[in-house]
Image (cartoon, rainbow, N blue to C red):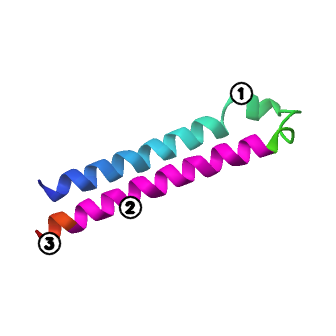
Amino acid sequence: MNMYIYFGIFSIILLFGLVVTFMVGFSRKNREGDQTYFQKTEVKWVRLTSFYVISIAAGLLALVAYIRYSIG
């Protein structure tokens, strides 16, 4: 497998995260202000933590695949 595929996948993930972050930041709801933002914070923390856990796990899997490809 070509190493450029890994770089491409990594770049796509980074660009996707950047685009989604800007979409959330510039959304109509954020521009107008949300009066209920500080309600149900536990649900928001659980969701955010799950996103980080999934992202870190995917990153570690990619690292293992890269190392296995490089060695063998």
As helix, strand or loop, the secondary structure at mark 2 comes to helix
Left or right: 42 in relation to 11: right
17 or 51, nearer to the observer: 51
Residue identified by numbered label 1: 28
Q: Quadrant of the C terminus?
A: bottom left
Tell me the magenta residue range: 42-67
Residue identified by numbered label 3: 71
Task: Give the percent coordinates (x, y) of residue 30.
Answer: 75, 35
Residue identified by numbered label 2: 60
Residue type of the residue flagged with mark 2 = Leu
Q: Say which quarter of the image contains residue 43.
A: top right
Q: Earlier in the sequence, mark 2 or mark 1?
A: 1
Left or right: 37 in relation to 69: right
Q: Residues within 10 Å of mark 2 (few under 14, many from 20)?
A: few
Q: Earlier in the sequence, mark 2 or mark 3?
A: 2
As helix, strand or loop, the secondary structure at mark 1 comes to helix
Q: Residues within 10 Å of mark 3 (few under 14, many from 20)?
A: few
Q: Residue at the spot x=49%, y=45% of the render? A: 17
Q: CA distance from mark 2 to mark 1?
A: 35 Å
Residue type of the residue flagged with mark 1 = Arg
Task: Give the percent coordinates (x, y) of residue 8.
Answer: 26, 50
